[in-house]
Amino acid sequence: IKASIPEPQRAAWEKYAVKSFEGQEGFEREVVRHVETTLARSLFNCDEKAAYAATSLAFRDRLITDWNKTQQQHTYRDAKRVYYLSLEFLMGRALDNAMLNVGLKDTAKAGLADLGFRIEDIITQENDAALGNGGLGRLAACFLDSLASLDYPAWGYGLRYRYGIFKQEIIDGYQVEVPDYWLDFNPWEFPRHDVTVDIQFYGNVQKSADANGKTISVWDGGEVVQAVAYDVPIPGYATPTTNNLRLWSSKASGGEFDFQKFNNGDYESSVADQQRAETISAVLYPNDNLERGKELRLKQQYFWVAASLYDIVRRFKKSKRAWSEFPEQVAIQLNDTHPTLAIVELQRILIDVEGLDWDQAWAIVTNTFGYTNHTVLPEALEKWPVSLLQNLLPRHLQIIFDINLFFLQQVEKKFPDDRDMLRRVSIVEESQPKMIRMAYLAIVGSHKVNGVAELHSDLIQTTIFKDFVAIYGPDKFTNVTNGVTPRRWLHQANPRLSELIASKCGGNEFLTDLTNLSKLEQFVGDKDFRKEWAEIKYANKVRLAKHIKSTLGVTVNPAALFDIQVKRIHEYKRQQMNIFGVIHRYLTLKKMSPEERKKQLPRVSIFGGKAAPGYWMAKQIIHLINSVGSVVNNDADIGDLLKVIFLEDYNVSKAEIICPASDISEHISTAGTEASGTSNMKFVLNGGLIIGTCDGANIEITREVGENNIFLFGNLSEDVEDLRHAHTYGSHTIDSDLDAVFKEIEKGTFGTPHDFGALVAAVRQHGDYYLVSDDFHSYIETHRLVDEAYRNQDEWVSKCITAVARMGFFSSDRCINEYAESIWNVEPLPIKE
Ligand code: Z2T
């Protein structure tokens, strides 16, 4: 590496090198300096927004020093890097995380107090970076945190959406979407106007001959859009390692407008070109577990993938290594099929641009990529019409056809005369219109394919990808059970619990090795410890109750059992079953005498989550929840015994308040539909129990915490197919309690019955695809057991402590170490001072 500063001047650079602040005094000095100079505010005119800005800038400066050092060392030491390609990074807020990771939150708290601010008021000024939908995007964010905390050289690559996931308002009980313009002030990103890539779309492919007479394909014409890099530092916890998240923003290539057009008086069309280019990175598609096949989405995918690969290849080429060493320097993980075009793009670069022959290139490609599948739901599996690809990416379509041809020849050899096998596994679906199956392309182009929990990984190998296991053998497929970062989801969200745990587990080591939590188990019998534990839970419930009061105006009793379901609204996640269960509880209470009612356990049923804007049924569910709430919450017979709350605009920063406040949380998807789930882990880690089906990671949570410390119910995944079949072809009788709930809805108790007709009909008339009726009885029965268990507070708290003590497995650190060892073949590279 050649440094740009010649020897004689180096001493001066070293002498004036930036030293980051250390103590409280240094911090305050930096805050005041930023207020006065960077923000150009007069000293005594500093509001909370300005104090947030200045505090962030002070911490940002601190991160930059470590960030530069990390990137220099990773480059200089030439280590293998991991590239995590994800269309979604649901990061949440950065300031609190940065303060905790560099170990200076207490310093900042004291410093801000000295300047007249409460740190909580400053932290909450920040907009969430909400560049994701749900679990998939949050998983990517937890992974970045673990990669940095474990000192792995790694970059994330994504899109810099101008609008993240919409903000949700509830008006008259219905969801209304409001745009999330989050970039008005974002101190955490660094525009790299010098790091740009021109991305080509449309055009034509011509065959021609190179100097040696070899036929080559030339892709030309079409339109070009420029990708501009924006970098976000990702600090590790208690380590100088600071990795990079590079987000691409689109703009018109060649500057603001096309001056040719502009000067010819074609002002409008030159502005239109600019806007079309900027549209690519304008907005996150707001669907969770659904693909709608829109051209702009495909453009986003190619734009991001092509810019990222250009960047990765450019970096590799600086090392002057042979191409065959590419997979030893580069591991690329595909977060679902969204970046699958990266496989095709790398093959294109290697054969069309770098002149490698097909087989040599393909070996490099397949050894570089790993593919993570996140769902088995058919409506979420990506397929693109051949005609769309032909138009947008003609050369890529040719390469896909060739990949498919060679793949099918290989299959043919292994399974001669099995025409149906060839039809089933072909990357090109011979439908009308023809479609490219992206998951199949991702499998064929990767060396490892993984699911995200044991059941899910088994399911993909025995159902949707069964043929590929037969073709490649079982070793190509593996499981890596999801995890969550204990820094954000325990230490940051629940500081008091984290402190209590530290006092019993010999300090903060559990934050970097979560298996240390097991030391808690020896204190389960300690009465004082249990009391402190229960007090912290209560305080967290008070905090949530205050939030509910201030946002919804509803008073809830923090001594009641808090029952929480927060996640994207989806029929497979069965929020409808939850609200039907709440109605059943309401009817049961109404039937009781006042004396009997007095003996009942008060409960607060809390919901939260966004519905995709085009998902009509999910919006009906939200409406029903709110309608039930307005009846139940105002019923004098019921009082505190039951409250129904729908929290507006569930997001990462709200989850940090919600997760620590649950007594019980709901993870009740139809068995076999939720690939993993990760909020289940967050809730248990924060000392709440869960009620759940035998689905996704619930099964492994049960294995770890023990059957006595979880409430499982419902049909098993292996029975789902037969039950569905019976609904359609046999006689379908509805559970009698559920039927009573439906009749009450139809009486108009919760408003115009017609409004909820579709929710009832889905169960009664349309085959109850999600098995709500089949599971209803055991669901209600299990909730009765929850009430019963909660009455014995001593036992309840013991269960909670035991469960937390056994949650070590679900750290995203464990998960990242598994990826590193079994998929990426990379090792940590701690930064030297
Ligand atoms: C998503 O959040 C998930 C899967 C998807 O499949 C898409 C999205 Cl946006 C295409 C979720 C799963 O539903 C959830 O079970 C899992 O825990 C999470 O991904 C992370 O793996």
Image (cartoon, helix red, strand yellow):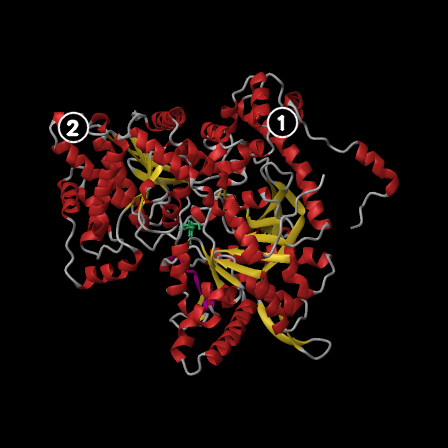
**Element on which disc 1 rests:** loop
Vertical order, 573 against 556 (above or below): below
Q: Residue at x 45, y 43 (%)?
A: 165
**Element on which disc 2 rests:** helix
| Residue marked by disc 1 | 39
Residue 485 is at least partly visible in this image: yes
Q: Is residue 341 left or right of residue 289?
A: right
Estimate the x, y position of residue 228 in percent, counting from the top left.
62, 49
| Residue nearest the viewer, comparing 128 with 420 | 420
| Residue marked by disc 2 | 597
Mark 2: give few (<14), some (14-19) or many (20+) Cα within 10 Å.
some
Boundaries of the magenta span:
380-388
Residue 264 is at least partly visible in this image: no
Estimate the x, y position of residue 121 in percent, counting from the top left.
49, 24
Vertical order, 74 against 61 (above or below): below
| Residue nearest the viewer, comparing 406 with 33 | 406
